[in-house]
Image (tube, rainbow, N blue to C red):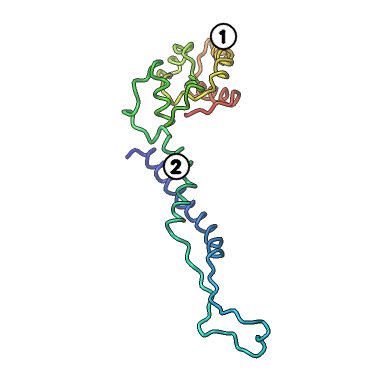
Amino acid sequence: MKLATKKIFNKTLLIFLLSFLLVATSLMPAFAATNVVNTSIPVDSVATNDVNTSVPGDKTEIQAVPAVYVIATVLTSARPVIQRILASPATRKAGDFLKFSYKNFRKNLITLTRGNPGTKYEAHHLLPKAHESRFAKAHIRDIHNPKYGTWVDKTYHRKTANEFNNHWEYFFKRYEDKGKFPTKSEVLKYAKTLCDKYKFHPNF
């Protein structure tokens, strides 16, 4: 098991245990209150001064919260977090994907995100194909890797595509005009800056 996968597994286990304790603690008082059984015998209030209404062994019994219900609730609460962790590239095998290419980009992004959002959304390259040769010089030769993609509303995608590409043109020109070239870390940092600007959700 790779180190990254171990870290993901440990994080998942910790989240699960903390969620279990949190939900179980919050549910116990509520269920205890709704499962109170009063075993006392009602007595006419007029006779309460003359008759001993106590019954030997009279106790208020509290039924325990069903463990199965608590576990089911915890699993339901933790499900979104677990799904996000499972969708992380660190938990996937390379064999799960098709060859990284422009043609397979959407299918691989579906695999990465574990869901097909339908025709309303398009697979967006955060590292545009128009600048593929420039990204290669920055040692990023797999721009069709789905981790460099995200789902974008079709209308919004087509409306902002040219502007998005122009931002990258300006980014590279700033370096090229000085006879320099950006590093891989600088490219990815700028990609995340654009994600913030356009409200995209990166997978790297």
Rate crowding at label 2 as few (under 14), some (14 to 19) or many (20 or more) other CA atoms within 10 Å.
Answer: some
Query: How far is disc 1 from disc 2 in space, using C-alphas?
Result: 46 Å
Q: Amino acid at mark 2?
A: Ile
Q: Quadrant of residue 30?
A: bottom right
Residue in view at x 45 percent, y 13 percent:
132
Rate crowding at label 1 as few (under 14), some (14 to 19) or many (20 or more) other CA atoms within 10 Å.
Answer: few
Q: Quadrant of the N terminus?
A: top left
Residue 163 in picture, x, y percent from top left: 59, 14
| Left or right placement of residue 148 versus residue 36 in this view | left
Nearest the viewer among 70 and 45 is 45
Nearest the viewer among 161 and 121 is 121
The disc placed on residue 177 is: 1
Q: Secondary structure at mark 1?
A: loop
Q: Quadrant of residue 104?
A: top left
Residue in view at x 41 percent, y 41 percent:
8
Determine which residue is flagged by label 2: 82
| Left or right placement of residue 72 versus residue 152 in this view | left
Residue 147 against residue 177 in the figure, above or below: below
Total labels drawn: 2
| Left or right placement of residue 98 versus residue 27 in this view | left
Residue 106 in picture, x, y percent from top left: 42, 21
| Left or right placement of residue 25 versus residue 105 in this view | right
Q: Secondary structure at mark 2?
A: helix
Q: Amino acid at mark 1?
A: Asp
